Image: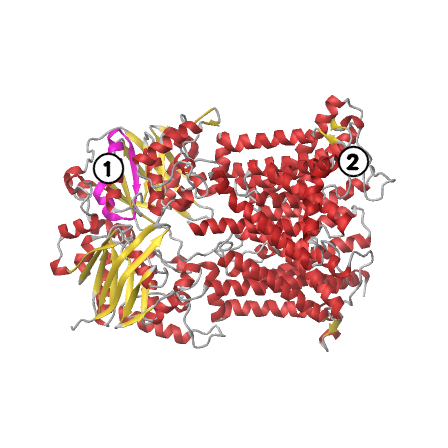
Amino acid sequence: MEQTTILQMHEVNKTFDKVKALDNVEFELKSNEILGLLGGNGAGKTTLMNVLYGLYKMDSGSIILNGKPITIPSPKDAIAHGIGMVHQHFLQINNYTVLDNIILGTSVSRPWTADRKKEKAAIEELCKRFGLEIDLDAYIETLPLGVRQKVEILKALYRGVNILILDEPTTNLIPQEVDALFETLKIMVKEGLSIVFITHKLREVLHICDRISVLREGKNVVSLTRKDASDEMLVRAMVGEGMDLQKSVIFSESSKKIITTKRETVLQLENVSLVNSDKINVLSDISFEIGAGEILGIAGVAGNGQRDLAEVVMGIQTATSGTIKFMNEDITQSSTKENISRGFVYIPEDRLADGFLHKASVAYNLILGYHNLPPYSNKGIVNWKNVNAASREMIKKFTIKTTGPDDAGGNLSGGNIQRVMIARAFSQSSKLMVAHNPTRGLDIPSMDFVYKNIFEHAETGMATLLLSEDLDELLLISNRIAVMYRGKIVGILPREKFDKYAIGRMMSGYDQESK
Amino acid sequence: MTQIKKSLPYIIAVVGAFIAAGIFIAAIQYNPFEAYKTLITTSFRTPNGFIQTLMKWVPLTLTALAFTVPLSSGKYNIGAEGQFLAGAIGATTVGILLADLPPALLIPLVIIAGIITGALWGLISAWLLYQFNINEILSTVLLNFISFQLVDYVATGPWRDPSAGAPTTIAIGQNGYLPMLIKNPPLSIGVILMILVAIGIYFYTNKTTSGYELVATGANPRAAKVHGIDTRKMFLLSMVIGAAAAGLAGAMEVSGVQHRLIEGIHSNFATLGLIIGLISRGKNQAVPFVAFFIAVLEVGASAMQRTMMIPSQVVLIVEALIVIFILLSDLIKRRQK
Amino acid sequence: MTGIETFLVEFLKLTFLSMVPFVLAGQGTMLGGRTGVFNVAQEGIMLTGASVGFLVGYTSGSVFVGSIAAMLVGGLFGLILAYFTTTLKMDQFVVGLALFFVGTGLSTLLPKLVLGITLTPPLIPTLKNIPVPLLSEIPVLGPILFNQNILVYISVLLSILLWYLLFKTNLGLRLRSVGENPKAADSLGISVNRYRYLTTIIGGMLIGLAGAYLPMVYTGTFTELMTKGRGWIVIALTFFGGWSPLIILLGSIFFAGIEVLSYRMQVGGSVIPFQFLNMLPYIGTIIIMIFTFGKSRVPAFLGQNYDRERRTL
């Protein structure tokens, strides 16, 4: 097939709060191709595509579509130019039906009545053409993430896009669903679409993309076709020259310090169940144990009870039934405060909501949870001298970019907020770490830094409950992986039995339902 | 230097508000320069003016703290009016019922009664929030309206002073009057009590772990809860502390100024307290200073209405403009980053 | 008709008469809330609406012109609220509270400026009842429902119209999406700001008119703080009504019923001191909140500003 350039972006610059997110970036998309936009977190991939979709205004630069310069001040204009985008966090109205979500913002045949028969027929036609099976009358909030992604793709197709941007589309999919998505993408290319596939996963770009473009720290690194690309080359392009790959956890087998000897049990859950305020069984009959120095991974598609599990262990929610034991002591009814003084640390999943005090200073943030303990306070009086000294130390050690302990939390960028979370968690000599997606939003060297820290603490006997939606991360550093589906543990695999597709099948509940 | 640089936007905001209000005053056919001269200087020209300013300073600081302490935990207490009145009712009740006690007993009892009834009035909203998650703005406001009726009931009941025009109770026992610092013009020791309370609240919020938890709760309640802070307790505590401050203000207005419960005793203290709290941007330590400034304006406003026939509500517009301009100055700082 | 029946007819007639400020201000609040703008300045806007409606009605000699003026000034408050929250992205509560002060101050200041400081304020003619032909002849129901002033009819029709627009049309689908997930709406080319401005301004107009109803129907004149907390009760009403026009209409009848009850019991003579009867609407509201708060669904982005370029992790 003859491929012509349909879209170009020239010398794009974008700055957020003094941080240069895009630095003279060049971008090119050809007709009928899947272009992989590869890079670690913070590389500027999503920012670049948000500029193209009209969500962000670029500081300078130009966009040329089919040879003509255009401007895209808002998503409306992007849609008008035939550009669609599926965001990593789906932009959907939870209490609307699938149909209403798809037609939202388009003009309909009978706008002043509730009759949408014509639109429904058109969407059903699209579903057939692209092999996407969806109940159009279902409410979004009742659907699993895999289906919700199909809704996002349909939204773009219904608007008749020529260019479709997919931002980390495999994040919430099990391996089987990833394969199905790739099939759909191939059909779309055949139907004449061009696709931009944003990802940080090497294997995916090598598998599906025709061309690959790598970004790092907001700059172009390299663009090449798949047949010219190799593993090592892309890794080096993503992480840069500064990182020692031989000593990294991510790229070198020998750096993984997984403890294999059986040690004393630190945390034990026996038949733990949780019924939430809407009377829904969010956790049922969960049993497992974690030994000292062990990392237990929890795999599962987002929203299958991982967050509730983390919160029950931390004492943020109290189990409805069952027992939780820490060092053989029953802590089922313990408060979070008590658990923290026992040596629990928590890296919550949603750090903006659950982990960070925007309106307080950096020092306030760095001692959150440990403010009752010496040396930060004594007999109810805060020792600000100690707090400030410890804060300065953490800022230095974890390279947090800030003016000092008194700086307002709101001044920190996303990556630095994550560093605050990490600094707070690793500043303690802890016995149990509950970490939920601890590396989300970090670039590759920082991810590696987190893994190294986990291993370091594991060597001193810390048990880790690692809940992650990134299956690769779990496979990389866990001793064992437990799979969660609809609030249940459907199986626990030891490291020697790790198998991506087997875990994927368990994550989808396939094993569960066939029983 | 940095301190000056930091406060510059606020100074500009205040000056800007005065200019804007001046244009308004000119537009309604009055001389803004004359008006402002009266407004600013009345407090400092005569001892009487200064004492009057101090007398307003006391309830204004306390009702403002009633707003800012709960705000530290992220809750909006709009009920200082009701809590003030509850405190006044409690103080009056004790002052009348136990009128024969010696001063060493009666004075503390009257004050404590006011603090407790004020705190209890606030506790209703705090409990509704704690137990049923009911928005505190609504419950505190609704309780204000209930308190007006309660005052009317007490002031027209058996204790009514028939010689007074407006609904008023008889005086509390003389032994319950707050001691005077200055006899003429009269100024009670309430001003000292108020300063102690303000210092205590500063120490609590900035130096104690409970105060740390209060601020953390206000900064992000969800994150605070996840990290072991009992946020619902902090909401409750901060509401009750704030309400107690308002109750104290009510008790001191009875025991130190009026010596009886009068309908309308709350004046516009609570509304001004909210404005002071907003101008202080919720910072407890800034409240006494801002409150003094507003007390100066208020004393000037009455003088302005008396001598120049300018409606005193004009000052409310000046104050509202200061609030808005300070919010705008925050915004400009945010944009500059 | 027996005594009880006469009492009931009178009670219900007064209830429908008194529901109007609740309906108008409730729907106004609901409209803004549906796109995410949570107005808490109702009490101030209603007071200004009452003040301006009365003053303009008096000087122009027309209640109609007075109502229009009250709506315009309410719309202006809505515009200011929208500008500060939507364009400047300032905290909605703080701006709302500031507007509440401004409205309260303005409402007492304006009569002093226009009329001077007088002891006997002038009166305007109150709204006349317009019996609906035929329907008003129906026994019992006729006098209750179909012999009322024009705004009673308008408030019912408005509620039904709003329900249809919000839930049955494409416009409503777009409008509600802004309050449920502004980022999603924005990504589909729906202008978040335009909908927020529009609903907040129209909402402000309705709240202003709700205020003007008080002097136009109840008193014939403006008295200080005459809303007596109705603006705040309206906020409780919108939660009670689940931000849904028809339930807000029902809720308004209920809240108005409590108000009329407290008034009727005083007229009828009661052993309970009148001050406690006066408390009824407020205590009633608190009790209702206990049963409805946290149970009714609110627009997901109620009270939250939207900034397209704000980055999340």
Q: Nearer the viewer, residue C118 or C21?
A: C118
Q: Amino acid at mark 2?
A: Arg
Residue that mark 1 sits on: A452
- Residue at 58 percent across and 29 percent down: it is B200
Asked if the stretch drawn in magenta spans residue A454, the answer is: yes
Residue A477 vs residue A360: left or right? left
Please give the range of residues in magenta. Answer: A451-478
Residue C11 vs residue A188: left or right? right
Q: Tell me: residue A412, above or below residue C268.
A: above
Q: Nearer the viewer, residue C285 or A75?
A: A75
- Residue at 39 percent across and 56 percent down: it is C309
Q: Position of residue B175 (x, y in %)?
A: 78, 25
Q: Position of residue A215 (x, y in %)?
A: 23, 54
Residue A125 vs residue B73: left or right? left
Indicate the colouring scheme: secondary structure
Which chain is disc 1 placed on?
A: A
The secondary structure type at the circle numbered 2 is loop
Q: Position of residue C172 (x, y in %)?
A: 50, 67
Which quadrant of the view contains residue A495? top left
Q: Position of residue C210 (x, y in %)?
A: 66, 62
Which chain is disc 2 placed on?
A: B
Which quadrant of the view contains residue A445? top left
Q: Is residue A77 visible?
A: yes
Residue that mark 2 sits on: B260
Q: Tell me: residue B213, above or below residue B334.
A: above
